[in-house]
Image (cartoon, helix red, strand yellow):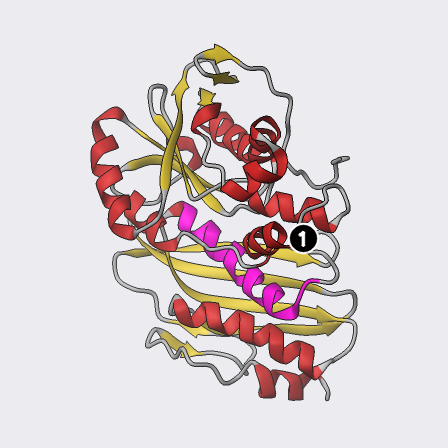
Amino acid sequence: MKEFELIKNYFTEQAVKRKDVLLGVGDDCAVVIPSEKQNIAVATDTLVAGVHFPVNTSPRAIGHKAIAVNLSDLAAIGAEPSWVSVAITLPQIDEHWVDEFCTGLFDLCEYYNVQVIGGDTTQGPLSITVTAQGLIPVGQELLRTGARSGDWVYVTGELGDAALALAHILGKKELDKTIFDKVRQRLDFPTPRVLAGQALRSYASSAIDISDGLMADLTHMCRSSKVGANLVLENLPLSESLVAALGQEKAIEMALAGGDDYELLFAVSEDKKVGLEIALADTGVKFTCIGQLNPSEKITTTLNSKPAAIKVKGFEHFSKND
């Protein structure tokens, strides 16, 4: 099978056919019809084998994750996902692999009513680049620059499970099969918090998705907004599996530093706190208040109301990460 047969057989037919797509897969460009009074949010992420996912990851999980990480970026700004373009580089064409990859990709697209409108296929080391576009009402974008001193800091979901799974795969932590099976789901099949992101638009002052670790991404928000923060460590949402595998102290460290959570981290002012909690409760997504912003432009941590100095950092490309 050659390139254009691959595109025709696996990427042309899909369940989602949006009315705002004038021209999709199969031409030099895709053409979409912008909605009135809506801005278009655009996110692009590349996943490289051995960097963003272990080399033995199932193709279905790779397809799912390639879409999920981009939809997570759209969720962080409050956008409704609409269209994606997929560029995939393959060492060779393995039809079973491609079929499973497309299953993971299109299942998630169908769930969120997202249409694949184009992309590219090339030969080389395995990598996938996705550009996702979404719609957001004019003026309702959630930005990293909007946080203010006094705002409360929240996260969705639980933190650290994906990093624990990766630690096991890399031989850094031995897990029993029951725990590994649970946490690997969080690594391979992250859930983009799309509905939560849209619910935040009327309440949150700032938001970011957690891809490189809580501390790293909170630092991005604080630097952009020129504020500091104190995290209350006993409030961090940790799974039973994470605590059972590591104990409380090490579980907290992994929740702070581990990446691949793809949960939302966001800030909300005191006067909008109750409204935000009601709106998020309606989405069915778990959420937790984990601290408060302050004017210090530094991040501190407390445990049981006492200062707790923890030296952790998140993932950063082109740096030495242990």
Residue found 46% across the figure and 31% down from its top: 236
Residue found 65% across the figure and 84% down from its top: 6
Residue found 62% across the figure and 62% down from its top: 129
Instruction: State the extent of the magenta-drawn residues as a range.
Output: 57-76
Question: From the image, which quarter does the C terminus lie in?
Answer: top right
Membership of 115 in magenta stretch: no
x and y percent of residue 218 in the render? Answer: 50, 31
Magenta portion: prevailing SS class? helix
Residue 164 drawn above or below residue 17? above
x and y percent of residue 187 in the render? Answer: 59, 53
Membership of 66 in magenta stretch: yes
x and y percent of residue 147 in the render? Answer: 38, 28
Q: Which residue is mark 1?
A: 52
Q: Nearer the viewer, residue 260 or 288?
A: 288
The answer to whether residue 139 is visible is no
Residue 207 drawn above or below residue 195? above
Q: Nearer the viewer, residue 21 or 194?
A: 194
Residue 151 drawn above or below residue 44? above
Dividing the picture into quadrants, the one containing residue 156 is: top left
Q: Nearer the viewer, residue 299 or 233?
A: 233
> Which residue type carries mark 1?
His
**Direction top: furthest residue:** 306
- Is residue 221 toward the left or the right of residue 36 in the image? right
Q: Local crowd at mark 1 within 10 Å, few (<14), some, or many (≥20)?
A: some
Residue found 62% across the figure and 35% down from its top: 246
Q: Secondary structure at mark 1?
A: loop
